[in-house]
Every structure is written in C-alpha cells, then in structure tokens.
Amino acid sequence: MGNEQLEELRKKLDDVNLQLLDTINERAKLVQEIGKVKSAQGVNRFDPVRERKMLDLIAENNEGPFETSTLQHIFKQIFKVSLELQEDDNRKALLV
Amino acid sequence: MGNEQLEELRKKLDDVNLQLLDTINERAKLVQEIGKVKSAQGVNRFDPVRERKMLDLIAENNEGPFETSTLQHIFKQIFKVSLELQEDDNRKALLV
C-alpha cells in the first residue's frame, strides 16, 4: 500500500518537474525577447532595481511551504543564468 | 513604442515568475508528502537513483533555450532545499 502511494506521488512529482521545466524555458524565451528590445534601445541588460522588484513580488506572494529566502535564492540563480543567456545572444548577434 | 513593448514583456515575466513560485511550492508539498510516506516506511529520504532519474527526465524533455546542464543545476538546487524541508518536518515530528 505504501509503495503504491509512493509511486503515485512520484508520478505527480515527475509531472510537476516537467511543468517547471516548461515554465523555466518559457521564462527564458521572454528574457531573450526583453534582451532584444533592450539591445535595440541600447539599454544595459542587467537591471538591479527590476530584479529587486521581482524578488519583492515573490516575497509578497509566497504561501509556502518554502521560506521566502529559499525561493529568492532559487530565483536569483534563475536570474543569473537568464542574464548569461542574453549575453550569449548578444555575442551571437555581434558575430553575424 | 519600445518602452510599451518592454512593459508588456515585463508584465508577462511577472506572471511567469508567479507561476514558477506556485509550481515550486506545489512541488515542495508533494515532496513533504513523499517524506511522510518514506518516514512511515522507515526508508531513507535521500535517494540518489531517483534524483538521477528526475535529472534524466529533464534532459530528455528539454527543448531549450536553456542548456540541459543549466537546468539540471537549477533542479539540483531545488532537490537540495526540498530535502532540507523534509528534514525540518522530520525534526518537528520528533519533537512532538
């Protein structure tokens, strides 16, 4: 009985993992679009004020069980790799 | 025009951030449930084989733009904090 329950929960976890994967990649595409608009405007891609606002939004909307600090740490990681993605796009654009 | 476009993209990004927040917390609740089942069975919470399988699932389903290694790094962070959440639950259960 316990094993069946465990298998069912694990199946649900796999589904949630795939949902997370899709959402993170969907987010990356948006960040790439933002990078293009900023690049056309000649604006710096890294915007600490905007990052702060996004982290505040996480804090305001967090209903747990994760602590806000834990979630903000994960989001900061996502921000970091997103910025790297924009920089790669920029380098490729310069090489064309 | 460029600024309007930027504002629209940022609004979309905020929505995606909130969706990510919900999914990460939904994942945490599932992990807590799994922790309870494992605890009742006296099974160790950390399962490297299961983690490997979850990372393989990410690799198989990644359509980009993020590199698989980048995504796996983010997921490993999420696994780590999830395990910590299970350990906290366990400590609280022992203190009751």
Image: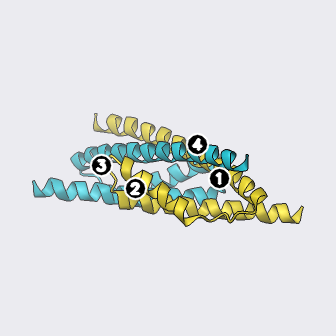
Chain colours: A cyan, B yellow
Between the residue at mark 3 and the residue at mark 2, the CA separation in whole angstroms equals 11 Å
Disc 3 is placed on an element classified as: helix
- Residue A71 horizontal side relative to residue A27, left or right: right
Relative depth, front residue between A61 and A21: A21
* Residue at position x 33%, y 44% in the image: A29
Q: Are marks 4 and 1 on the same chain?
A: no
Between the residue at mark 3 and the residue at mark 1, the CA separation in whole angstroms equals 35 Å
Between the residue at mark 4 and the residue at mark 2, the CA separation in whole angstroms equals 36 Å
Q: Farthest residue to the right: give it.
A: B96
Contact flag, marks 3 and 2 (Cβ < 8 Å)? no
Residue B31, numbered circle? 1
Q: In the rendered image, which residue does mark 3 sit on?
A: A35
Between the residue at mark 3 and the residue at mark 4, the CA separation in whole angstroms equals 34 Å
Disc 1 is placed on an element classified as: helix
Q: Amino acid at mark 1?
A: Val
- Mark 3 or 2 closer to N-term? 3
Residue A47, numbered circle? 2
Q: Chain of mark 3?
A: A
* Residue at position x 49%, y 38% in the image: B15
Q: Amino acid at mark 4?
A: Lys
Contact flag, marks 4 and 2 (Cβ < 8 Å)? no
Q: Are marks 4 and 2 on the same chain?
A: yes
